[in-house]
Image: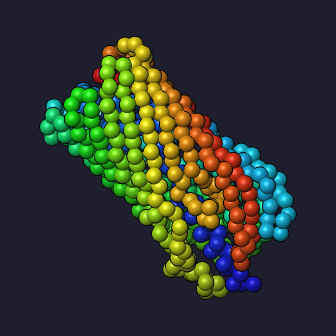
Amino acid sequence: MKKILTLTALGTIIMASEAMAAGFHLREQSAAALGNAFAGATAGAENNSYAYFNVAGLTRQKGTQVNAGGTYIVPRAEASNVRDTSGNRGQDINNIVHAAVAPNGTISHQLNEDVTLGLALNVPFGMITKYDPEWQGADHGITSKLITVTTTPMVAYKVNDKLSLGAGLPIQYVKARLTNSAIRGTVNDAALEGDTVDVGYQLGALYEFNEDTRVGVAYRSEINHKLKGDIESSSPYPFLNQDISAGLDTPAMLSVGAFHQLNEKWAVMAEYQRVFWSSFDSLDIMGDNYNSSYPFVGGGLVSSTPENWQDTNFFAIGTTYQMDPQWRLRLGLAFDQTAVKRKDRTPRIPDSDRVWYSVGLSYQYSDNLSFDGAFTYISAKDATVDLADTSTQRGVYAEYNNSVKLFGLSLNYKF
């Protein structure tokens, strides 16, 4: 019995950290770029919010500029035909994923004709999912909450009239809280909570063939986090309560974008991004407190589990139409590949391939002040979770229908 319960405790921690490994990549860092479904985001450099995608584009921002905005994210995830491996039906579940706001802001200052400095605040990863504590899949997840906040000092250098280079130092704070059943098939719950601050880097290059055509290449490194926290449980077993640490790598990203101004009215753009989720190759859980009564979960390595996430591709095309000197219309279409194969999909992140449909408007109020607004509808392919019984968790089957609505708004001010 002791060994079964010990494995259950380890399973609780493993499932919690697995959810963090998949994360939830929030591309929504620019209302202007959102209007084009992020097509050409690496080459656009239309205002300094594009520096998140390519810091080299800051050389196109003259003087001192401020961009401030946010995206209201309204996801919908519904689970139907919920049942356990014995065929016992559960209640269909609505409202699994909760709405949230992802803020962003950038300040840039042109130091001289060649050098521009910048500072950005972004929320690049995050998710909130919540189930009823007594649902059939409680062993695999009840609540999942992941928040990241990144502050990035940046510098861009104009090598010549055609080539600009840039670099940034993302300083990323991560906090996570995840809960699920502590003991298979019971209402005893367990919660893992932890946080950390770590640093990565980003590099970018922008090449302008002429005033109408430019291409960009950008690389954002993975950030190796080591969360420190604890696991707490309402169960009577002491080994379910101890300090732990767990590794979490936010993935590296490589992006290539192109922008071309066809004429005074029309511009077209395209984007490709590779997200290296496969860098999360194993999950290592460390226990900080040694307990002689339960040596399976003492200090040192508690468990090492291989993961099966795959690298993903993102493709986008877009167009912009200058309706008059003040108003600009944006359109975009994108395909976003999931990192999770069907056999590895879990209730915490019932993810699938997605198609983005975007529209946006930009308004030039004055020479100094402008506004950007955008709306995106993301249609996700139906997803199925089908997990078998294990010694620590009950199996569960559920069919998911997912979609997301995004509302972006920002202002730009030039001093």
- Viewer-closest of 88 and 201: 88
Picture quadrant of residue 407:
top right
- Residue at (45, 45) in percent of width and height: 315
Residue 254, percent from left and from top: 36, 52
Q: Quadrant of residue 177?
A: bottom right
Q: Is residue 231 visible?
A: no
- In this view, which residue lies farthest toward the right? 88
Q: Residue at x 76, y 66 (%)?
A: 188
Q: Residue at x 71, y 71 (%)?
A: 388
Hey, which residue is sitting farthest front in the picture?
262
Q: How many marks?
A: 0
Q: Is residue 212 visible?
A: yes
Q: Nearer the viewer, residue 114 or 404?
A: 404
* Residue 252 placement (x, y as % from top left): 39, 56
The relative height of residue 280 versus residue 39 in the rendered view (above or below) is below
Q: In the rendered view of the protein, which quadrant contains the N terminus?
A: bottom right
Spot occupied by residue 49 in the image (x, y as percentages of width and height): 38, 35
Quadrant location of the C terminus in the rendered image:
top left
* Vertical order, 150 against 43 (above or below): below
Figure quadrant of residue 237: bottom right
Residue depicted at x 15% and y 40%: 159
User: Along the line of sight, which residue is nearer the eye, 16 or 78?
Assistant: 78
Q: Position of residue 293 (x, y in %)?
A: 65, 86
Which color scheme is applied? rainbow
Nearest to the observer: residue 300 or residue 185:
185
